[in-house]
Image (cartoon, helix red, strand yellow):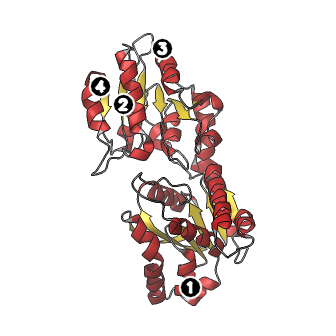
Amino acid sequence: MSVLILEPYFGGSHRSFLRGLMENTPFEFKLMEMPARKWKWRMRLAAPAMAEALRKKGRRFDRVLCSTFVDVAALRALGPSWLSDVPVLTYFHENQFAYPVQVEDERDIHFALTNMTTALASDSLAFNSQYNLDTFIGGIRDIARRAPDMTIGGVEETVLHRARVLSPGLDFSHIDSAPEPERDDKPMRPVVLWNHRWEHDKGPDEFFSALYKLDAEGLDFSIVVLGEQFERQPPVFEEARERLAGRVLHFGYAPERADYARLMKLCTVSVSTSTHEFFGISAIESSRAGVRPLLPRRLAYPGLFPDEFLYGEGELIERLRQELNNPRRLARDDSLRLTGPHSWDALRQKYTDWIADAERGA
């Protein structure tokens, strides 16, 4: 079975997911991609551009798999005629109803509407978490209430009929093969991990503010700060590098997967303060490395982790203080229990069935 993948934003988690999918499912794949930049332009114009390219190529495929950066309704309207006959599947890494916007920006509801018409024009849908699906359905309900002088019947029911939840398969081989560090110090010294993108929606100000307070209390701890960096980043990172210099074991991106895994295995507790998370790959990866997660009781996290690893509003500092006063790592069995369901070993057949069983007009 031949599968055409259309990905206008080939970077980060989108790229990792597709590479894993192509390696772990038994299809003949053809990837048509664009670099991961200018996401608004991608959502507006990638579909017409890709439709034109497909008209010129002339080749027909058995399935088409898109990300939500493809306007599937426009793709099918403008593309070659065979797109009307074959199943089109869309994988939702995120949705624009719930994606956070900068404070100075007003949400452009038209991007969310593009997600909605994409869902209606696709034959089968997969969402990376229940939270992603739930917020998408909530957004559709809100649109139905707000739409002036128009009613669009059955949208919610159509989406739910076509949708399933499939977490993005993860390859843990680099983490599993990383050596355990020697731990001669008794008791274990607490090490706090940050392994998220250096962006405002990951909540770095709240994270470092908590560390400043615990630092002022004189608690004993070190920090490992990882995560992808960009040309522009929140100034709190540079401030924290200076204010917590005496506690830093590592501060910066680790481009090699082996180094990333090795550094995570130095840590005892991994903290998230995210205001945006549709899945939580970094939390899953650090848990695989044996780091105890400490995550907000919101977004996708309650659907992925037991309540013992979640904190409520205003509880971060006290919960983190407890972790520092009683440092410990996850037992191997607990680590496998938390992360195993998200491995490609567990998901390979589910993705194979999703693609193979898709039907036109389902």
Amino acid on which the number 3 mark rests in the picture: Asn
Residue 29 placement (x, y as % from top left): 52, 70
The span from disc 3 to disc 4 (Cα, nearest Å) is 19 Å
Count residues near mark 3 (Cα–Cα under 10 Å), then give few for <14, some for 14-19, many for 20+.
Answer: some
Amino acid on which the number 2 mark rests in the picture: Val
Which-is-in-front pick, marks 4 and 2? 4
Q: Which residue is mark 2?
A: 224
Residue 152 placement (x, y as % from top left): 70, 74
- 170 lies left or right of 201: right
Q: Which residue is mark 1?
A: 77
Residue 40 placement (x, y as % from top left): 42, 67
Element type at mark 1: helix
Q: Which residue is mark 3?
A: 325
Q: Which residue is mark 4?
A: 244
> Which quadrant is the C terminus positioned in?
bottom right
The span from disc 1 to disc 4 (Cα, nearest Å) is 55 Å
**Rendered residue at 75%/66% (across/down):** 157
Amino acid on which the number 4 mark rests in the picture: Leu
Q: In the rendered structure, are the residues bearing label 4 and label 2 in contact, judged by CB atoms less than 8 Å apart?
A: no
Q: Reading the chain from its start, which is encountered first: label 3 or label 4? A: 4
